[in-house]
Amino acid sequence: MPENDNAAETMLPAPDTKRWVARRKAVIVNAVRSGVLSLEEACRRYQLSTEEFYAWQKAIDAHGVAGLRVTRLQIYRDAPPTRPPKLPI
């Protein structure tokens, strides 16, 4: 393993992380994108589903790291279409 890969791996959150703040999620996404971790290794190590990882990746692509914040997810999530109000007959 090259020296800078080793340094990048030491920046990864602990495998037993329970509290996933936006910064930690971003570190995992960046580690997979840069090849420090494979998707399979990240999901195994952090007990993530691939769907969860891809949701993090999509949030970063669409809204940056701020899109990973739970409160932001509620705002950014596609809202269901609203029906027009019923008109009185």
Image (spheres, grey):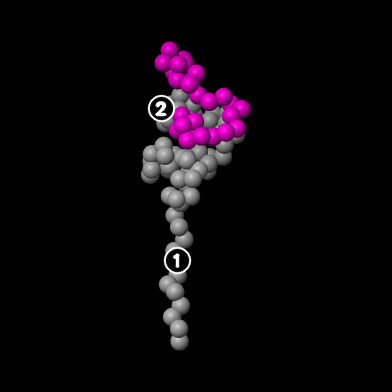
Q: Which residue is mark 1?
A: 82
- Please check the rendered image and state whether residue 7 is part of the magenta-colored stretch, yes or no: yes
The residue nearer to you, when weighing 6 against 26, is: 26
Are circles 1 and 2 on residues that touch, CB within 8 Å? no
Where does the magenta region start and end?
Answer: 1-27
Q: Residue at x 45, y 20 (%)?
A: 8
Mark 2 element type: helix
Q: Is residue 11 visible?
A: yes
Question: Marks 1 and 2, how far apart in space?
Answer: 40 Å
Label number found at residue 34: 2
Where residue 9 sits: x, y (%)?
49, 20
Q: Residue at x 45, y 16 (%)?
A: 7
Q: Residue at x 43, y 12 (%)?
A: 3
Label number found at residue 72: none
The amino acid type, in three-letter code, at marker 2 is Ser
Which of labels 1 and 2 is toward the front?
1
The reply, left or right, for residue 61 in relation to residue 44 is: left
Q: Is residue 6 above or below residue 87?
A: above
Q: Is residue 44 visible?
A: no
Q: Residue at x 58, y 26 (%)?
A: 15
